[in-house]
Amino acid sequence: MFPGSKIWLNRIVAIVRVYRHTDCFDTKTGAWKERTETVYYAASHLRSAEVFAQLIRNHWGIENSNHYVYDVTLKEDASRIRNSPGIFARLRSFSLNILRKNNITNVSEALYDNALCFDRLLTQGNRMKLFSTCH
């Protein structure tokens, strides 16, 4: 038993097992590969399988729309910032919010198109539109 686990053991009322099938693109081979894994969730409330499935899908929707972009496109996990990393995390969130407000769907492409063009940010004002005078 782990230290402090007695507190949690009394609260867990269900263990949810999920078989996950995903297709992953292998950038080295240029081919799609199927991946199957089994994951487990601990739940403090008993729900139907349909409700658990919807809750888990909602969780992964957030993961895919936010954290994946931070980790892969903005390379947040690889960041070596040691002083005030929270400030840079907020700047990354701010930049992502600006892109999303402008209906940008390809964040990587938008970052490339807008790199080194601080004028675009300064000209936003009330418009919140990108793509002004640079290029």
Image (cartoon, helix red, strand yellow):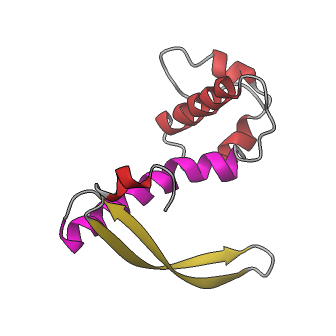
Residue drawn at x 18%, y 70% as measured from the top left: 48
Residue 83 lies, with reference to residue 63, above or below; the image says above
Residue 131 seen anywhere in this rendered image of the structure: no
If the image is split into quadrants, where does the C terminus sit?
Answer: top right
Task: State yes or no: residue 126 in magenta.
Answer: no
Point out the stretch of residues depicted in magenta. Answer: 47-74
Magenta residues, dominant SS class: helix
Q: Position of residue 72 (x, y in %)?
A: 68, 53
Residue drawn at x 47%, y 34% as measured from the top left: 101
Q: Position of residue 100 (x, y in %)?
A: 50, 39
Image quadrant assignment for residue 74 = top right
Image quadrant assignment for residue 86 = top right
Q: Which one is nearer the viewer's eye here, 6 or 69? A: 6
User: In the drawing, does residue 3 fall left or right of residue 70?
Assistant: left
Q: Position of residue 85 (x, y in %)?
A: 70, 28
Residue 27 seen anywhere in this rendered image of the structure: yes
Residue 102 lies, with reference to residue 73, above or below; the image says above
Q: Position of residue 41 (x, y in %)?
A: 39, 66
User: In the drawing, does residue 75 fall left or right of residue 105?
Assistant: right
Residue 104 lies, with reference to residue 46, above or below; the image says above
Task: State yes or no: residue 48 in magenta.
Answer: yes
Image quadrant assignment for residue 55 = bottom left
Total marks drawn? 0
Residue drawn at x 65%, y 21% as measured from the top left: 121
Q: Which one is nearer the viewer's eye here, 130 or 51? A: 51
Q: Which one is nearer the viewer's eye here, 13 or 101? A: 13
